[in-house]
Image (spheres, rainbow, N blue to C red):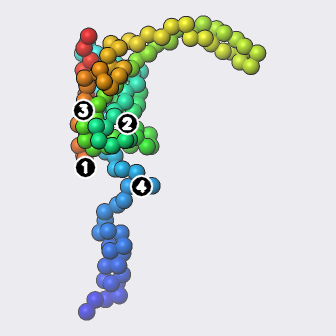
Amino acid sequence: MMTKIGMLVAIILLATGCGKQKPVDGRPPVYPTTLTVLYHGEPVEGAIVTLRPKEGTTAAYGKTGADGSVKLTSFDPGDGALAGEHEVRVRKVVLETVPAPSPGNPDGYKIVSETNEVPDKYDKFETSGLSVMVEAEKSNRLSVELVD
């Protein structure tokens, strides 16, 4: 005969799906993903990286640090990326600016040039030729090497 505590535990397990959690707010599950970007064998600092899943609609993105790595974000900072294959785009732009004060913004600046410090082909998913595989149920440490 089942005790009251045993019955309560059974009801809780049935109600919660035996420990299986639903994604937050109906979001698809994401998995911790760190991506390192190298160019000429050196880490690329300050690059904006975007992963676009081949299946699904939720991209992951982030900005690389001094070691060329970034913890990717899909929904919340550093939460990761969807499982599956992703196309990768990388952009590192340096802006040249000059002072351009205006009545509403006395400390304003005007952009006079924009230089991408990695080859332009990496700025578009269609031309980058880069892809990575994010695996479910694990922490992913991935890397891409940019070439001229």
Identified by mark 3, the residue type is Val
Give residue 36's position: percent from left, percent from top: 29, 27
Q: Is residue 111 left or right of residue 145?
A: right
Q: How many C-alpha atoms fall within 10 Å of the one at disc 1: few (<14), some, or many (≥20)?
A: few
Identified by mark 4, the residue type is Gly
Q: Tell me what residue is drawn at x 37 percent, y 36 percent.
A: 60
The disc, 4 or 2, on the residue closer to the chain's N-terminal end is: 4
The disc, 3 or 4, on the residue closer to the chain's N-terminal end is: 4
Q: Tell me what residue is drawn at x 25 percent, y 49 percent.
A: 137
Residue 1 vs 74, above or below: the answer is below
| Furthest-bottom residue in this view | 1
Task: State the CA–CA distance, disc 4 to disc 2.
Answer: 17 Å
Q: Which residue is mark 4?
A: 26
The disc, 4 or 1, on the residue closer to the chain's N-terminal end is: 4
State whether residue 66 appears in this view: no
Mark 3 secondary-structure assignment: strand
Q: Is residue 77 left or right of residue 3?
A: right
The disc, 2 or 1, on the residue closer to the chain's N-terminal end is: 2
Picture quarter containing residue 57? Answer: top left
Picture quarter containing residue 1? Answer: bottom left
Q: Which mark is residue 132?
A: 3
Residue 103 vs 55, above or below: the answer is above
Picture quarter containing residue 86? Answer: top left
Identified by mark 2, the residue type is Ala
Give residue 32's position: percent from left, percent from top: 32, 42
Q: How many C-alpha atoms fall within 10 Å of the one at disc 4: few (<14), some, or many (≥20)?
A: few
Q: Nearer the viewer, mark 2 or mark 1?
A: 2
Q: Which residue is mark 2?
A: 60
